[in-house]
Image (cartoon, grey):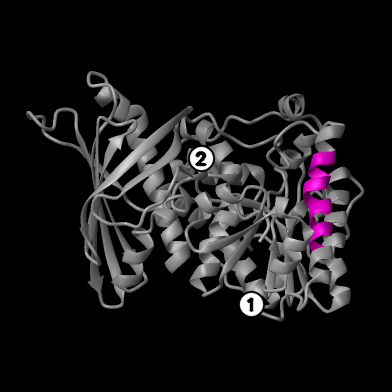
Amino acid sequence: MTGATGFIGRALVPRLQRNGHSVVAWARSDTRAMSLLGADIDVVSVAAGQEALVAALSDCEAVINLAGEPILGARWTDKRRAILRASRVDVTSQLAAAIEAAHPRPRVLVSGSAVGYYGDRGDERLTESSSPRDDFLSRLCQDWERAAQSVSANGVRVVLVRFGVVLGRAGGALAQMLPPFKIGAGGPIGSGRQYFSWIHLHDLVKLLVTAVEDDRYRGAMNGVAPEQTTSRTFARALGRALHRPAILPAPSLALRAVFGDAAIVLLASQRVEPAAAKQLGFAWDFPSLDTALRDIVDGSPVEIVRLRPDATSKRTFLLRTTTRINAPVEEAFAFFSKPGNLGLITPSAMRFRMVGHVPAMAEGAIITYKVRVGPLPVRWRTRVVAWDPGRSFADVQDSGPYRLWRHEHSFAAQGNHTVMEDRVLYAPPGAFLAGLANRFFVASRLRDIFKYRADIIRLRFG
């Protein structure tokens, strides 16, 4: 995989592992990739050179190419356009050359693209056979796809997945949209009449895995949901999911002033249909916008209560959540008791990094890592204080941002499934303002973290 540490890649890794695949990430930083992607992946560093990439590909049956700098990261200056091109076209060309040199070669290349291929098309219905346009984004997509398609001359099956706007928790477009919508200041973009092609993150990774495994999948495929919507109807649906009004528009002039030419990503109208996936019988888990947004916004239930104040629990809180895991208790316990998997189940915004030696889990083991709490980098050291293999374990914070932190994990078999219960006893920093800190910041962040973790569990185990 390329782009394995990105928003889509971090969801795709556990989904591939769920189907029994081993994953090799081609990454610029091997330490970052191993911190973020879990204990059960291999990493080939870009710095190791083309020979190392060819050697890795010679042991792989499939390649998934998700490389690319964010399209809407900054104004499209000449320098920025060159970066966008290099991160897509040049990286894909390098990957294609390595595939051609590999022996044996991978059987399939699944390569990302975007619905920007079609350009701004109003209410025209667009399928995989629709023509492209002659603008920067469309030309970028065409060159990107051409670089990937080149390996088909060597008998490699190629699938070109044109992504719509990918909706998921803790990243992607929705992470930028949610803050104004949560305070009732959200609304349609521009006129609101432009079509907005979208897909739930879990459906996209399901489509990518299916494209790897099913030989019928080849050529261009639109990675979008079957339900079409406009910017206005999307804003209303997100408002409903959050129980907030969604009537304040983001004017086109303001967007162009902020993003320049890059504003076309937000303002273009693309009424894209997933015709190829429909024809092959692909089944979306979230075919409608309302169900997709409810799943992302609501997530797994996480209860937080304030304990009655006494001599030991003043301004102390208890977090509880229960997760049903589609795996035997031995497999579930093994996954959660590996320190190397901590980064995989932590939102990317927290910038999780292991520090120093990673010990085997046992009573007394000390694990040190760095995370970002809001804008602040924090060094966190945790110690395992209880260890009952297959049943439970508990860790406490030796040093870190909380006055008190004790996390208890318990596992119970339920047939071939596992019921895992988390109980976290914590006290926010700042003894006198702990209640306010919890109400306005800490509790919501903890809910987001545990809901993200539940999403990864669902991707990894089903």
Q: Earlier in the sequence, mark 1 or mark 2?
A: 1
Tag in front: 1 or 2: 2
Report x, y in % for residue 336.
35, 59
**Regarding mark 2 in the picture, which secondary structure is present there?**
loop
- The image shows residue 453, relative to residue 73, as above or below, that is below
- CA gap between label 1 and label 2 equals 32 Å
Residue lying furthest right: 134
Residue beneath the point at 55% across and 68% down: 16
Q: Nearer the viewer, residue 428 or 369?
A: 369
Residue 383 drawn above or below residue 13: above
Q: Give the quadrant of the C terminus.
A: bottom left
Q: Position of residue 109 (x, y in %)?
A: 74, 69
Q: Which mark is residue 213?
A: 1
At a point 28% along the width and 61% down the height, the residue shown is 420
Q: Which residues are magenta?
A: 82-96
Badge 2 is on which residue?
Answer: 351
Query: In the rendered image, which quarter is residue 309 located in?
Result: top left
